[in-house]
Image (cartoon, grey):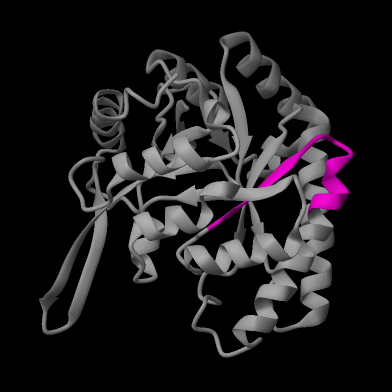
Amino acid sequence: MKLGSTGSVLIPAPGSDPLLGRIDRAVELGLSVISVGFREPAQRTPEYMHEVAEYAAKRGIELRRGGGGRIGSADPEERRAEVERVIDDLLEVNKYTGIRFSSFANQPMPHNRWAPEPPMDERIDIIGENLAAIGDAIRQAGMALGLENHCDYRGWECAAMLAKANRPNVMAQLDTGNAFTVFEEPVDCAMALAKYVVSCHLKDIKVTPLVSRFGTVAVNAVLGEGQVDNIAICKILQEQAPDPASLALLVEPLTLKPEDDPNAYLLGSLAWAREKLAAFLG
């Protein structure tokens, strides 16, 4: 397994380019892979995307992407348009960067497993079929897609979508902490998805049941300070994931408050991961 980070907690040096600075920060921290978004209009020019990809290659950093779409919408026309948009987006970035993996989240997050329409069994089929269509379209570019449990569906539901898609390049990005947000034990989620997992958001969550009469609270925690058993999860992935050696563990917070220090979060989490997950890191 390879240790990396999502871009949100890689703080570039003052005055540096946002993405190039994140690559430099990853090198400083001894990481080998990061996720990037290319979300700003200025970041979507062919010249800039090519520059970022070349710089990452020279510095020994693998780039991965994240994205999503409304492919489970109750509106058939919206689903069709979103599948086309996602395909165009993935192929455009691949053309200029060579990035071959993108995670995928069902959007919007409020349209989750508790949404009334479409019914869950139909929705699983719809999402699976649309994932298959995306997978077929990007296969020509050597790309793979990783469906993420994105604070919306439980592990077995995501696994059912992937089984319906049934494409070798449509796999899973496990998020170890998101399971708690849909009232699922993270280890159970990992077990349901393990045979599909090619990428992983490494996250910890501190859950306080009935913190007050207003309900339960789940908040972000530095790795090792919450209740997610990331050691057990990595053991499951080591045993059952298709290719554990290439599997990226990307440190990511659930949410950070404005007063939180993202650098302190990242340094604390990386220190824990390097100590407690050493048996899994290549």
Q: Position of residue 259 (x, y in %)?
A: 22, 47
Q: Quadrant of residue 11?
A: top left
Residue drawn at (76%, 27%), measured in percent from left and top? Answer: 98
Left or right of 199: which side holds 269? left
Specify the quadrant of the image occupied by residue 64.
top right
Place of residue 32 in the rendered image (x, y in percent of width and height, measured from the top left): 50, 20
Specify the segment rendered in magenta. Answer: 135-148
Res. 71 in view = no
199 lies above or below 87: above
Q: Residue at x 57, y 64 (%)?
A: 158
Q: How many marks?
A: 0
In the depicted structure, whether residue 198 falls above or below residue 281:
below
Direction left: furthest residue: 212
- As drawn, is 38 to the left or to the right of 248? right
Where residue 41 sits in the image (x, y, percent)? Answer: 69, 44
| The C terminus sits in image quarter | top left
Q: Position of residue 153 (x, y in %)?
A: 50, 69
Determine if residue 21 is in view.
yes
Give the residue at x 44% y 20%.
Answer: 31
Asked if the magenta segment contains residue 80, the reply would be no
Q: Is residue 216 left or right of residue 37?
A: left
